[in-house]
Image (tube, rainbow, N blue to C red):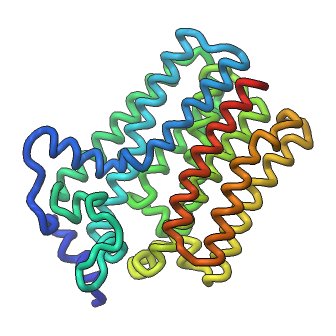
């Protein structure tokens, strides 16, 4: 039995990490916030800014629309928190988080505070219940958003339902990331949280908004793909089937390069065929420069975590560019 499997077997019984469980309201709240990765998933919630800017510049946004978007955003917080909590629970149980965050001699490879189960700030059962309650919150709020929406296009309801059914099963339940579907979820779910709420308010799906949704999903995978590159050893040991695990080092670099090229090319295609304004490419130039820098530096130095950080910067820059496009267009 290898070290990761042995660690997972011990932790599957619910034993806490090396530290003491968080006591008191504020420390416990902080631990649950770290479990939900609130600091690192804020970018998901930028989707609502893209939608609001598109609505303001397009069909308009009244009180009913604001209510729908508010309910959708609150539900989104629940769904994303559940995904992150269950991912930590699974990573704690199978030992992959320990492998990815601690070296064999116990030295921290990444800030251990990000993993409250590893530090012992939360017990396994607490994290599991948090995941279930967050998911229930997401289901309730997204259902309320759909019921109160001025428009209820079937495609928006179906896509929202698919995210509810599949997103939390990334590492839990069906464990879709262990079956080679992780990248599809990481790109597809963020795309839906852009286009679905727009559809619930406006009732249609303009070509430009669809392009923006696809870009939003691409930008998420162009952060995650570098994380997966860093986690190859730990993920492979527990059977998580990411592209980084399945492909050779060269194949993985090619995969990331293709995604980076699609990111740049999609903007040019949208402008060329009339899905967006002709000047779309010009507004997106800051993102293009950051994307090229991210990938080329990764090819030179192989530093996946640095590339990941640059991906986060590129993501936020891209969102700002989309908002600017929407408001001007």
The residue most toward the top is: 63
Q: Quadrant of the N terminus?
A: bottom left
Tell me which corner region of the image, top left, top right, bottom left or bottom right, holds residue 291.
bottom right
The residue most toward the right is: 273
In this rendered view, identify the residue nearer to me: 144 or 251: 251
Q: Is residue 318 above or below residue 93?
A: above
In this rendered view, identify the residue nearer to me: 320 or 200: 320
Q: Is residue 278 above or below residue 305?
A: above
Residue at horizontal 40 percent and vertical 77 percent from the top: 234
> Relative to residue 5, is residue 306 drawn left or right?
right
Q: Is residue 123 above or below residue 240?
A: above
Residue at horizontal 75 percent and vertical 44 percent from the top: 284
Q: Position of residue 25 (x, y in %)?
A: 12, 38
> Relative to residue 108, is residue 211 drawn left or right?
right
Tell me which corner region of the image, top left, top right, bottom left or bottom right, holds residue 95.
bottom left
Q: Position of residue 31 (x, y in %)?
A: 22, 49
The residue most toward the bottom is: 1
Count of labels shown?
A: 0
Residue at horizontal 53 percent and vertical 74 percent from the top: 303
Residue at horizontal 29 percent and vertical 50 percent from the top: 34
In this rendered view, identify the residue nearer to me: 227 or 162: 227
Q: Position of residue 160 (x, y in %)?
A: 54, 37
> Relative to residue 56, is residue 32 drawn left or right?
left
Q: Quadrant of the C terminus?
A: top right
Q: Position of residue 321 (x, y in %)?
A: 68, 38
């Amino acid at each position: 039995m290898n070290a990761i499997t042995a660690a997972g077997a011990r932790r599957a019984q619910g034993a806490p990490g090396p530290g003491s469980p968080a006591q008191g309201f504020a420390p416990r709240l902080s631990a649950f916030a770290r479990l939900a990765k609130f600091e690192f998933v804020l970018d998901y919630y930028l989707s609502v800014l893209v939608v609001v800017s598109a609505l303001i510049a397009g069909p308009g946004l009244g009180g009913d629309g604001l209510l729908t978007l508010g309910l959708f955003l609150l539900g989104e917080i629940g769904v994303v928190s559940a995904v992150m909590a269950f991912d930590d629970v699974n990573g704690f149980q199978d030992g992959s988080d320990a492998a990815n965050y601690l070296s064999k001699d116990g030295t921290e490879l990444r800030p251990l505070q990000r993993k409250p189960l590893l530090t012992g700030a939360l017990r396994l059962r607490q994290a599991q219940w948090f995941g279930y309650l967050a998911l229930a919150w997401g289901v309730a709020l997204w259902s309320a958003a759909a019921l109160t929406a001025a428009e209820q296009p079937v495609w928006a309801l179906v896509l929202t339902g698919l995210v509810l059914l599949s997103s939390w099963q990334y590492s839990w339940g069906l464990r879709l990331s262990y079956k080679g579907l992780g990248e599809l979820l990481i790109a597809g779910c963020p795309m839906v949280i852009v286009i679905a709420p727009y559809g619930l308010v406006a009732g249609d799906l303009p070509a430009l908004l669809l392009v923006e949704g696809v870009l939003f999903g691409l930008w998420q995978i162009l952060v995650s793909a570098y994380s997966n590159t860093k986690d190859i050893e730990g993920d492979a040991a527990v059977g998580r089937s990411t592209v980084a695990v399945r492909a050779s080092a060269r194949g993985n670099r090619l995969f990331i390069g293709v995604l980076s090229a699609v990111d740049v090319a999609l903007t040019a295609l949208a402008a060329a065929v009339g899905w967006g304004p002709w000047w779309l490419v010009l507004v997106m130039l800051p993102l293009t420069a950051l994307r090229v820098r991210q990938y080329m530096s990764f090819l030179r130095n192989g530093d996946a975590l640095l590339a990941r950080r640059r991906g986060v910067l590129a993501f936020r820059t891209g969102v700002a560019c989309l908002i600017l496009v929407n408001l001007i267009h």
